[in-house]
Amino acid sequence: MRITVLAGGVGGARFALGLREAAPDAHITVVANVGDDMWLAGVKVCPDLDSLMYALAGVGDTERGWGRAGESERVAGELAAYGVGWPWFTLGDLDLGTHLARTALLRDGATLTEATARLAARWPLGVTLLPVTDDEVPTHVVTDEGILHFEEWWVRTRATAPAHRFVQHGAERARISDAAHAAIAHADVVLVAPSNPVVSIGTIVGIPGVRDALETAAAPVVGVSPIIGGRVVRGMAVTCLEVIGVEPDAAAVAAHYGARSAGGLLDGWLVAEEDAGSLEAIRALGMPAEARPLLLTPGGPAAQVAREALALAAAARP
């Protein structure tokens, strides 16, 4: 079985870990958001790709939820002393090694897809990790403070600077990578991870060519809700939803994505058991929906969520 997952960082990583356990014989491809990417202190930083890679490699910092385990920050201290970079966005020494290696590969002419493959080859990830595009599409946030890179809004202001809209700079000139397009077109199942619907999944789907690939895919497309009981378990996705006028509600996010039968994205929507009351409204949108436990704790629970998503995909197959 060929499974393709559209994913952001932490939530996407936890779901990918569960899927790898749930479907050990499947060929899994994770197509990742690159809207958080940036150039910082002269190096190319790809937060979502790195969160996915570190988690799947078993070297991520599970306590902080980002970066490498066992980090040191000597280089970050030196950069701060020179007044270089963002003092509120710390690059750990091990993490910086990843960014230096990526930057060297890109400077030598590799695409981001090729550079990601080279980095990922260091570890037995059990999945193929792909950026959705090789083009740069940094997410900017239009705020009362001015236009900020998404990471500045997210990390420095903790999403407290009043935001008016999100803009993927350069998206109109970007295109889906050939590898990402093939992963969607040739999949037996496409899963939308419980990642931020606005700046992770929204950015992925906003890359020219992605929506067309999903619309024409032979595989069923099933999403896993990032909402549990009207709340987002991790991160500040509720704030992002508020910016675009979507309630933090499982049915509202389903309507935001839309049913593929009505020109949207999804053939099925898996919601948390706490949101079972939304099932009738979701099904009225034209997509099958089921309610199951969705808390992505490591090990068995995350794997069971993945199994439930695959089961819904089998039932929703066009």
Image (tube, rainbow, N blue to C red):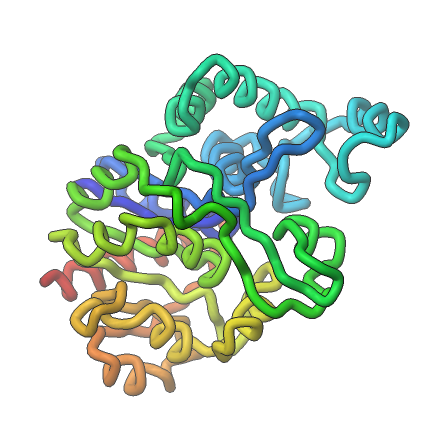
Q: Give the side of residue 154 with respect to residue 214, left or right.
A: right
Tell me what residue is drawn at x 46 percent, y 78 percent.
Answer: 249
Q: Give the side of residue 248 with respect to residue 213, left or right.
A: right
Tell me what residue is drawn at x 16 percent, y 71 percent.
Answer: 261
Tell me what residue is drawn at x 21 percent, y 38 percent.
Answer: 182
Look at the picture and state if 171 lies above or below 80.
below
In which quadrant is the N terminus drawn? top left
Residue 45 in sight: yes
Residue 20 in sight: no
Query: Which quadrant of the view contains residue 73?
Result: top right
Q: Give the side of residue 244 with respect to residue 225, left or right.
A: right
Q: Which residue is more in the foreground, 253 or 146?
A: 146
Q: Position of residue 240 (x, y in %)?
A: 56, 66
Look at the picture and state if 318 lies above or below 88.
below
Residue placed farthest to the right in the image?
81
Q: Which residue is more in the foreground, 141 or 74?
A: 141
Q: Which residue is more in the foreground, 146 or 122?
A: 146
Q: Position of residue 192 (x, y in %)?
A: 34, 56
Look at the picture and state if 288 lies above or below 103.
below
Q: Position of residue 212 (x, y in %)?
A: 22, 54
Tell me what residue is drawn at x 26 percent, y 34 percent.
Answer: 178
Look at the picture and state if 100 lies above or below 77.
above
Q: Position of residue 206 (x, y in %)?
A: 38, 55
